[in-house]
Image (spheres, rainbow, N blue to C red):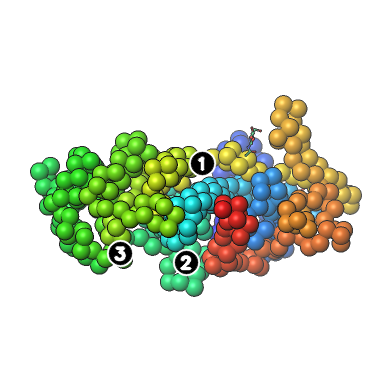
Amino acid sequence: IYILVVTPEKIQEAKEVYREHFQDDVFNETGWTYILEKYNGHLPIEIKAVPEGSVIPRGNVLFTVESTDPECYWLTNWVETILVQTWYPVTVATNSREQKKILAKYLLETSGNLERLEYKLHDFGYRGVSSQETAGIGASAHLVNFKGTDTVAGIGVIKKYYGTKDPVPGFSVPAAEHSTITAWGKDHEKDAFEHIIKQFPNVPVSIVSDSYDIYNACEKIWGEDLRSLIESRSADAPLVVRPDSGNPLDTVLKVLEILGKKFIPKENSKGYKVLPPYIRVIQGDGVDINTLQEIVEGMKQHRWSIENIAFGSGGALLQKLTRDLLNCSFKCSYVVTNGLGVNVFKDPVADPNKRSKKGRLSLHRRQNGDYVTLEEGKGDLEEYGVDLLHTVFQNGKIVKTYTFDEVRDNAKLKESELEELH
Ligand SMILES: *[C@@H]1O[C@H](CO)[C@@H](O)[C@H](O)[C@H]1NC(C)=O
Ligand SMILES: *[C@@H]1O[C@H](CO)[C@@H](O)[C@H](O)[C@H]1NC(C)=O
């Protein structure tokens, strides 16, 4: 989107801003005018990248950028900042996929199958992100692994830049929020609940139930006053009770215990308790990768199947992440001076972790399936097989794109990962 074509107006604008900003004429007007005249404003660089959605262990090369015109040797670093921003969707997708692994493990252990796994972690992050653009990018990264989202901005991004075979890549259900309960007044929570479930008899409906007292709501309102209305709902249209406060693990366990006294659970083939199909729970408060692990482990210990629950995650899913989590960076590794190629790298004395890779880089797969980054142009040797980095951008043109279905397919949980869970 951003590696746009250079125009005379843009060059003039940049020249003026940079002159003021640096109080000096450091902007290379000659260089940019050269690109404008020789390439019609298209950037003479080549970007190679690993197929989108690939699951690559950290520390490997994910993309390379080379200048294709020796005159424009300086251009590669001009795209550094904007390309390193890919840390964000990479990190959101990685973190979301790790949560999918946790959910898969516990779902399998407590139910024997992976049904509805893709709907177990719903994106609640729209309001917690820094911008509309962040919402779109972050939500689309989560949708690589899951299908539940309330951050609809992600749907637009995916449709515009990727495309899917399905009309939309993510789904949601009607849901109450606090105002749609509290606007009825404190004495009318039951009426609010009743009104909403009657409005949506044939689809799942999520109702936030902690406006005043979640435990009273579960026991008295859902469990007694409205019990018969809930019992008449089908498995395709459950009432989904949503607590939204308190310690997440304790609250989930207590809500399940109270609901389990009113709506008698069955034991599944793995020996875990499952509430009747017309009632489920969604925990969407305080959910991050650590609390998620604690809640599913706590449920397992109390013999509750993960079939009973779905999770919502907001700030932790889309915003509480930084570039330092996976240490994404972009460094110069190779220069050609007077026709002579030189491998370059950094290796700061105070942090060996910050050593950068040397020379021309390529990504390969060993016989055993492990990924390896080859440095110093070694990947050119035939014995290492093909480079997994493909040219995606060449001299101003995008030459390779992926559909969202391909991205999802690349990122899906592998057989080997699922076997490890057994
Ligand atoms: C400016 O760009 C021109 C043309 O690409 C290049 O030859 C020159 O070395 C650049 N100057 C600086 C200071 O980067
Ligand atoms: C990122 O770098 C820091 C500082 O070098 C290091 O402590 C940390 O372990 C690295 N993170 C990962 C995931 O390797």
Residue 241 drawn above or below residue 324 = below
To which residue does mark 3 refer?
235
Q: Which mark is residue 159?
A: 2
Q: Earlier in the sequence, mark 3 or mark 2?
A: 2
For label 1, the SS is loop
Q: Which mark is residue 321?
A: 1
Q: Earlier in the sequence, mark 3 or mark 1?
A: 3
- At label 1, the amino acid type is Leu
- At label 3, the amino acid type is Ala
Asked whether the residues under the numbered discs 1 and 2 touch, taking CB atoms below 8 Å apart as contact, a structural biologist would say no
Q: CA distance from mark 1 to mark 2?
A: 25 Å
Judge by depth and name the residue closer to the eye, 411 or 325.
411
User: In the displayed image of the protein, which residue is found farthest to the left?
Assistant: 187
Image coords of residue 351 (percent x, y): 71, 30
Q: CA distance from mark 3 to mark 1?
A: 37 Å
Residue drawn at x 66%, y 43% as measured from the top left: 329
Label 2 Cα crowd, 10 Å radius (few <14 / some 14-19 / many 20+): some
Q: Earlier in the sequence, mark 1 or mark 2?
A: 2
Judge by depth and name the residue closer to the eye, 207 or 361.
207
Q: Which mark is residue 109?
A: none
Judge by depth and name the residue closer to the eye, 30 or 357.
357
